[in-house]
Image (cartoon, grey):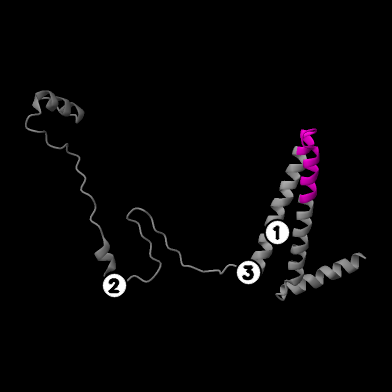
Amino acid sequence: MLTDLVASLKDQGEAANRGDLAGLEQMLAAQSVSLNSIFIELARRAALNMGEHLGATESYMRMALKAQAQCRVTVETLAEMKNPHPVAFVKQANISNGPQQVNNGPVPPGAIEDSRIPPPVVSMDPPPLPADAGPVLAATRSKRHGERPL
């Protein structure tokens, strides 16, 4: 009995390695039907207990919804096996909202010099005061920047 099971599992594994997924598809289809039956029975039991035994109703509904969710996942897996999504191997392209751009290809000659942006000019000097700033604002600014007031 156990040796027959091991031999059957070995045969199914070899078939899957050859690309023959019929046995796995059949198993997933049977699993989804079983899970749907479990969902229906547990939902029926929850409905029978509704109004009298709320704890039992909640427990049955939780199990029913878990069986339904697992049934959905099983059906999605089966659908993915039957109709696989196309796989695309794409080279990396990092694009940010700022000035960063990464190109993963050969750099054309002269592109580096043309694409350089000059660095911003940073000055440590305070901006000039307006003509009508007055002596109080000038004294306040000079205290902030470590200067002596006039």
Q: Nearer the viewer, mark 2 or mark 3?
A: 3
Q: Dot 3, how many residues are within 10 Å of its Cα: few (below 14), some (14-19), or many (20+)?
A: few
C-alpha separation, residue under disc 1 versus residue under disc 3: 14 Å
Mark 2: amino acid: Pro
Left or right of 96 in this view: 137: left
- Amino acid identity at mark 1: Thr
- For the record, the magenta segment spans 40-57
In the picture of the structure, the residue carrying the numbered disc 2 is: 109
Q: Which mark is residue 57?
A: none
The kind of residue on which mark 3 rests is Asn
Q: Is-magenta flag for residue 56?
A: yes
The residue closer to the viewer here, 59 or 126, is 59
Q: Label 3: state its secondary structure.
A: loop
Residue 76 in the image: x percent, y percent? 66, 60
The mark found on residue 83 in the picture is 3
Quarter of the image that includes the C terminus = top left
Q: Nearer the viewer, residue 123 or 14?
A: 14
Q: Write down the residue under mark 1.
A: 74
Q: Residues within 10 Å of mark 1 (few under 14, many from 20)?
A: some
Residue 117 colored magenta?
no
Residue 82 image position (x, y, % from top left): 66, 69
